[in-house]
Image (tube, rainbow, N blue to C red):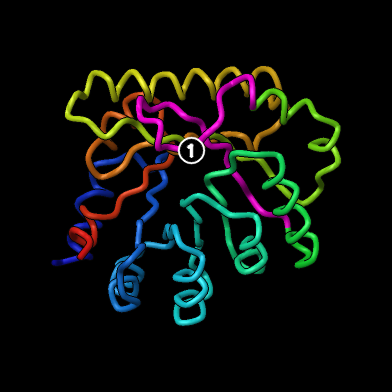
Amino acid sequence: MDISKNLLKIKGGIADTVKLVAVSKTKPVEDIVEAYNAGQRIFGENKVQELIYKQPELPGDIQWHFIGHMQTNKVKFIAPFVSMIEAVDSLKLLREIDKQAAKNHRTINCMMQFHIAGEDTKFGLDLDEAGEILESPDFKELKNVNICGVMGMATFTDDMGQVRGEFRNLKKIFDELKSRYFSASDEFKEISMGMSGDYQIAIEEGSTMVRIGSLIFGERG
């Protein structure tokens, strides 16, 4: 598995405006170093225990994105260094991120996760639930979180028409939130959607950030 060659191939096929999150979950530190040496700086992990093991072993300029379902009791372990928490799906979680960010004298970037897939197993908000959070007095009190955009996962299916429709729906959600709540925010600009099997469709539908693992590092063992 030539990680650096895989990275260059993927980066060569996407616009400079699209951020590539290299999904390094389950992969050894050596693989991440190889990707880092090839110029990759944003890496995605979905388990807190794995992330806090890897982070001290690797260069300090890596931007770590937490892309899994975040439990409130584990925020404190990654709050000192995490660059982005991509999957925020409750006000309770936002409050905890704000609290732990303040303790570390930081502002933590977050994205709101939306349920766009046909599968019930995926986490995420709908537009009404997001509106309730963003209009709540509690949200307005938060000083150490920065909402940068939205993320979502499409249905795991071979039906690319369905996948495209789900991505299109997330783009509509982004546009609605931008006009209603974030029109004055330059920070609210990211749409994180698209993985190894569907990232090209996601980009066509407006993705600004793709999460790619197996095409870079090979299938998980």
Report the front residue among 23 and 187.
23
Measuring 31% from the left and 42% from the top, which residue is drawn there? Answer: 195
Which residue carries the number 1 mark?
123
Quarter where residue 155 is shown: top left
Quarter where residue 180 is shown: top right
> Vertical placement of 219 versus 33: above or below?
above
- Residue 205 in percent (x, y) is at 36, 24
Would you say residue 80 sits in the magenta stretch? no
- Residue 137 in percent (x, y) is at 86, 32
Measuring 37% from the left and 43% from the top, which residue is drawn there? Answer: 210
- Residue 146 in percent (x, y) is at 69, 45
Would you say residue 117 sits in the magenta stretch? yes
Q: Which residue of the protein is positioned furthest toward the bottom in this rendering?
A: 57
Measuring 62% from the left and 22% from the top, which residue is drawn there? Answer: 177
The quarter of the rendered structure image containing the C terminus is bottom left
Q: Number of marks in the image?
A: 1
Callout 1, which amino acid? Phe
- Residue 215 in percent (x, y) is at 21, 53
> Vertical placement of 62 versus 165: above or below?
below
The quarter of the rendered structure image containing the N terminus is bottom left
The magenta region covers 107-129
Q: Secondary structure at mark 1?
A: loop
Measuring 36% from the left and 69% from the top, which residue is drawn there? Answer: 36
180 left or right of 191 in image:
right
> Vertical placement of 19 versus 7: above or below?
above
> Vertical placement of 155 versus 108: above or below?
above
Residue count near mark 1 (Cα–Cα under 10 Å), binned few <14, some 14–19, many ≥20? some
